[in-house]
């Protein structure tokens, strides 16, 4: 008899195959129609293929930005018997991409379980652990320390703890992306192709929708709200990361130790990034709760919302800590903030953040591929 684990793996493999087969079926229909050929990168890439193997499907699925334009333009969308719903079919394959290429592979199952309850439980559990650690060290209740975090948690302890979590997240995501890239065999990367892919990723070009008017959210009307909230989130995250990098440079290279003044570069970058990570995730969660029921994969919504809420909580606790760092509440706020950040890092490789890594890889392949002749001549680039 097969073990339960073997049966579970077989069931997952069957589900993966069904998701890939459904995208292949829909792409055959789209290839015959090609009404949406100019909508985004997916359809020009599609016209270079007559058949759609698993690697092709994973590539096209990660090119899709789920703007919804093709669904609302499609004459074969439900309730038509062809039931073409490209955004949903692509989203279902993207989840399989993350799980299939995850490292360690056994943790790929977390993509199917990573919901809001797990995210909040992880953040709450880590925050509680740090609070109890402070209580044991006698530093939970303290007089105002003028924002000196290292009087509460030693610098070396924070460095090792968060350095290890960040390194693990970076390695896990990097190995997953490398596995995906090898499977795609895209060829040599040229400077112009890399520059174009970077521009499209940084500008979120394909969240402009099919006609450059934005995404479809609740209905046929176009809106640029999702693209703007994505920009707030993406650049807010980058600004917070830049603040950490500058503070690290100050500490180790220049010997300037925290706390830093409110007008210093790390604090200004962190504050601007924190505001971005309040506005962006709040807006994306609002849109996610109101989106058209045929858009995307309903089974991924818990994962989407978990990542969004963690980003929002990280920013909220960080800004609260900045505002009250000179008070006696600093130790408790620091423990809550650090627990939230640590939860974000540990779940980063197995949550919604992965979509950014695979999407950039797919955009790079598209930029490489479109510079080659289209021998099928089924459409134009």
Image (spheres, rainbow, N blue to C red):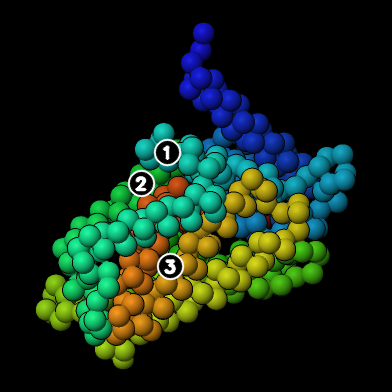
The answer to which image quadrant residue 329 occupies is bottom left
Residue 210 against residue 56 in the figure, above or below: below
Whether residue 351 is visible here, answered yes or no, is: no
Residue 159 on image: x %, y %: 21, 62
Question: From this viewpoint, which residue is outermost toward the top?
Answer: 1
Q: CA distance from mark 2 to mark 3?
A: 21 Å
For this view, does 261 lie left or right of residue 56? left
Question: How many other residues sit within 10 Å of disc 1, few (<14), some (14-19) or many (≥20)?
Answer: few
Q: Secondary structure at mark 3?
A: helix
Label 2 close to label 1 by CB (< 8 Å): yes
Q: Nearer the viewer, mark 2 or mark 3?
A: 3
- Pick whichever of labels 2 and 3 is earlier in the sequence: 2
Between the C-alphas of marks 2 and 1, the distance is 10 Å
Local packing at callout 3 (Cα closer than 10 Å; few below 14, some 14-19, many 20+) is: many
Q: Which label sits on residue 192?
A: none
The circle drawn on residue 314 is 3
Between disc 3 and disc 1, the foreground one is 3
Viewer-closest of 380 and 177: 177
Residue at the disc numbered 2: 172
How far apart are labels 3 and 1 at the CA level? 24 Å
At mark 2, the secondary structure is helix
The residue singled out by tag 1 in the image is 107
Q: Give the residue drawn at x 48%, y 42%.
A: 110
The answer to which image quadrant residue 305 occupies is bottom right
Q: Earlier in the sequence, mark 3 or mark 1?
A: 1
Residue at 88% in and 44% down: 80
- Which is nearer the eye, 81 or 33? 81
Dot in front, 2 or 1: 1
């Amino acid at each position: 008899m097969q073990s339960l684990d073997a049966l579970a793996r077989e069931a997952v493999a069957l589900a993966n195959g069904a998701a890939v087969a459904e995208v292949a079926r829909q792409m055959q229909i789209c290839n015959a129609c090609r009404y949406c050929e100019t909508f985004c990168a997916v359809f020009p890439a599609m016209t270079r293929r007559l058949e759609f193997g698993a690697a092709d499907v994973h590539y096209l699925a990660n090119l899709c930005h789920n703007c919804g334009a093709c669904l609302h333009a499609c004459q074969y969308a439900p309730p038509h018997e062809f039931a073409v719903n490209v955004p949903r079919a692509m989203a279902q394959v993207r989840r399989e991409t993350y799980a299939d290429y995850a490292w360690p592979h056994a943790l790929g199952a977390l993509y199917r379980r990573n919901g809001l309850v797990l995210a909040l439980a992880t953040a709450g559990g880590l925050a509680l652990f740090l609070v109890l650690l402070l209580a044991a060290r006698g530093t939970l209740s303290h007089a105002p320390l003028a924002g000196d975090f290292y009087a509460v948690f030693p610098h070396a302890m924070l460095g090792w703890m968060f350095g290890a979590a960040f390194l693990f997240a970076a390695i896990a995501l990097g190995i997953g992306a490398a596995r995906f890239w090898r499977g795609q065999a895209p060829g040599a990367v040229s400077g112009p192709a890399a520059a174009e892919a970077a521009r499209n990723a940084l500008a979120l070009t394909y969240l402009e929708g099919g006609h450059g008017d934005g995404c479809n959210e609740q209905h046929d009307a176009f809106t640029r709200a999702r693209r703007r909230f994505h920009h707030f989130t993406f650049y807010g995250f980058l600004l917070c990361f830049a603040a950490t990098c500058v503070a690290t440079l100050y500490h180790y290279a220049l010997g300037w130790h925290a706390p830093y003044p409110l007008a210093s570069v790390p604090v200004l970058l962190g504050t601007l990034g924190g505001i971005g990570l309040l506005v962006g995730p709040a807006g994306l969660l609002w849109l996610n709760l109101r989106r058209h029921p045929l858009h995307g994969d309903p089974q991924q919504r818990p994962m989407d919302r978990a990542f969004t809420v963690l980003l929002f909580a990280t920013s909220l606790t960080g800004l609260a800590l900045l505002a009250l760092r000179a008070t006696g509440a600093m130790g408790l706020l620091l423990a809550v903030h650090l627990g939230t950040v640590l939860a974000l890092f540990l779940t980063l490789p197995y949550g919604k953040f992965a979509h950014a890594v695979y999407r950039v890889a797919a955009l790079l392949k598209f930029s490489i591929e479109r510079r080659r002749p289209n021998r099928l001549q089924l459409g134009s680039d």
